[in-house]
Amino acid sequence: MSDRTENLLLAVPGLALLSLAFFLPIGKMLVLSVSGPDGPTLEHFARFLGDPFYLGILWRTVRLSVVITLVSALIGFPLAYIMARVGPRLRLWLVVMVVLPLMTSVVVRTFGWMVVLSRNGLVPDTLRDLGLVGRTFSLMQTEAAIVIGMVQVLLPFMTLSILGVIGRIDGRLEEAARTMGCGFLGAVRTVVLPLSLPGIVAGSLLVFTLSASSFVTPNLLGGARIQVLAASIYKSVTQTLDWPFAAAQAIVLFAGILLVLAPYVRMTARRHG
Amino acid sequence: MKTALGPTILGLAVLLSGAALAQERTLVINSFGGAYETAHRKCVITPFEQATGAKVQVTTAYSADAFAQLRAQKDAPQYDVIHFSGGQEIVGAAEGLLAPIDAAKLPNAAELYDFAKANLAKGQGPAYSIAAIGLVYNSERAPKTPSSWKDLLDPAFGEHLVLTDISNGYGMLGFLMLNQVEGGSLDDIQPGLDAVGKLLDAGAIVVSTSPEIQQEFAQNDAWIAPYASDYAFTLRKAGLPAKFVQGAEGTPASFITANLVANRPNQDLALKFIDMTISKSAEECFADALRYSPTNAKAELAPDVAADVAYGEDAVKGLIRFDPATIEKNRAAWVEQWSKTIAR
């Protein structure tokens, strides 16, 4: 058997699983999204794209995902740098600390945030004592609560992606920059940051796609009045039983994520071949 | 070989019959979670398991979700007995998802009020509890005792008002009543949506589930919520000074029904379960535990329990029932309009 055939055969189980579990359902959903009572139609897409309410939901989903990705990157990069530069013992504890939120159930964790952020919770109480907010201030059922809750659970993805890349950067490069007169921050900006860009891109990809398609946390923390696209799809599937429209919304979500990510990936790919 | 064949066949037969028996002795039902599910277990599920030796598997699903599941499972239903609180049984029976019930197979049906067993032959299961929708309020903090649905619009309640999303059965009925009070009808819900918009601008909040209402009353200084009488009792038991009052303009009622799902193997066991649900002792237990109004004419309630529910045939007949078929027909459009109204 030639090498080529051998490689192909090795790939067949994985390809079969991928097509069964991914391509087939996506295909069925594509068919469902253009199905109408009189045959194929684009009315579901037209309904979605022509209604400012749904466009608002799409914009909110994308906007929140971008914010969550930015915040995760801002927190994740320094954290990953510190984790890469400390000793192995401390690094282990830091990794455990970062991954710990992932080990609890998403619902339990979100309910914890509901207690901390509600009107009489820890955070608004402190802010009230400091005199910064009014008497009835509450962080619950706001977009800020969604960002906080999502960043907590997506930070490990970003941090560990960047950690892997920074760990492989030769420490002597930074030392060389420092001996040439660069300050600490300058060395990080000009040496570490460009070299860790692949890790940041990988982490951002993960965080963006996970937050754009997330449903439980935005639903519980944002409340009934702040809808993201995944929540709207859920409503269409279970409450209004409008499955073609739900499929159309899912396709729009998929396309939206691709549209935002493609230029990002192409931009960084060009820089690093 | 010859000697091994006999015992093998015998063993297989025992295994298969064991499996068949196990399948026959399990009943899959839905319940509504929280305090309701606890009472459901105490009043019906556990006595049923003890009496018949069968095992009951409970899935927590509100009526709208359970009905969506039933529709999706049309070719292979997973529930044996399904409970609805929003009138979904009327549409379910019309679509053939629920099986007609022979009243002769339900001995306790003879004791029910007529309206509670009106369409058994069409497939609509008997109503075993009635929830009256009115105003639940904090008797200590509310600036004045509410007495009518129009009081909800009083600016004094402002941001201490809790509205329930119409995905919840009681929330839907409360909204339709508010709509009616504002001049709307089942054909035109715009007055109701306008009123909700006004309330939201004044600071009211929207929740989706009943435990969230409890959280709002307990932690976030809520004073009033249009909801069911049974929930005021749940809040009182949790230590909150909650009281219930029926609105002067009328009291919408939610019939809670137990329905037989069509095309399932163990219909006799399911019918036994439904029969136990409508029995005198089960309905008294529900009224006692949760303050639901019983539909069994023979049910006897203690005076303090009777004061909290609609007791007696006349009291129960005076409740408003919004046509469930119209609600089900318009649900999709209403959910979309509601989402647009409450969106921020």
Image: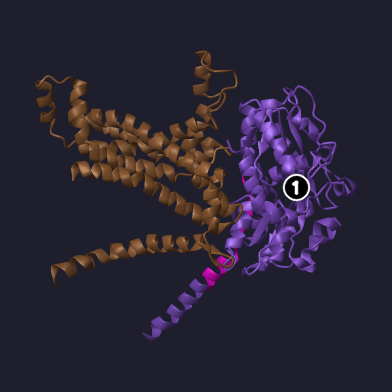
Q: How would you rate the neighbour count of disc 1 (Cα within 10 Å): few for under 14, some for 14-19, many for 20 or more?
A: few
Which span is picked out in magenta? Answer: B17-33
Q: Is residue B153 above or below residue A265?
A: above
Q: Decide if residue A42 is on the left or right side of residue B327.
A: left
The picture quadrant where one finds residue A242 is bottom right
**Secondary-structure class at tag 1:** loop
Nearest the eye: A199 or B339: B339
Nearest the eye: A224 or B136: A224
Name the amino acid, label 1: Asp
Question: Mark 1 — residue?
Answer: B188
Q: Position of residue A170 (x, y in %)?
A: 13, 33
Q: Decide if residue A36 is on the left or right side of residue B270.
A: left
Tint of chain A? brown
- Residue at the limit of the structure toward the bottom, as seen here: B2
Q: Position of residue B38 (x, y in %)?
A: 64, 45
Q: Position of residue B181 (x, y in %)?
A: 80, 39
Nearest the eye: A52 or B318: A52
Q: Decide if residue A124 is on the left or right side of residue B195.
A: left
**Marked residue chain, label 1:** B
Residue at 61% from the left image edge and 32% from the top image edge:
B215
Residue A27 drawn in magenta: no
Residue at 44% from the left image edge and 31% from the top image edge:
A148
Tint of chain B? purple
Can residue A136 be seen in this snapshot?
yes
- Residue at the limit of the structure toward the right, as seen here: B314
Q: Is residue B334 above or below residue A91?
A: below
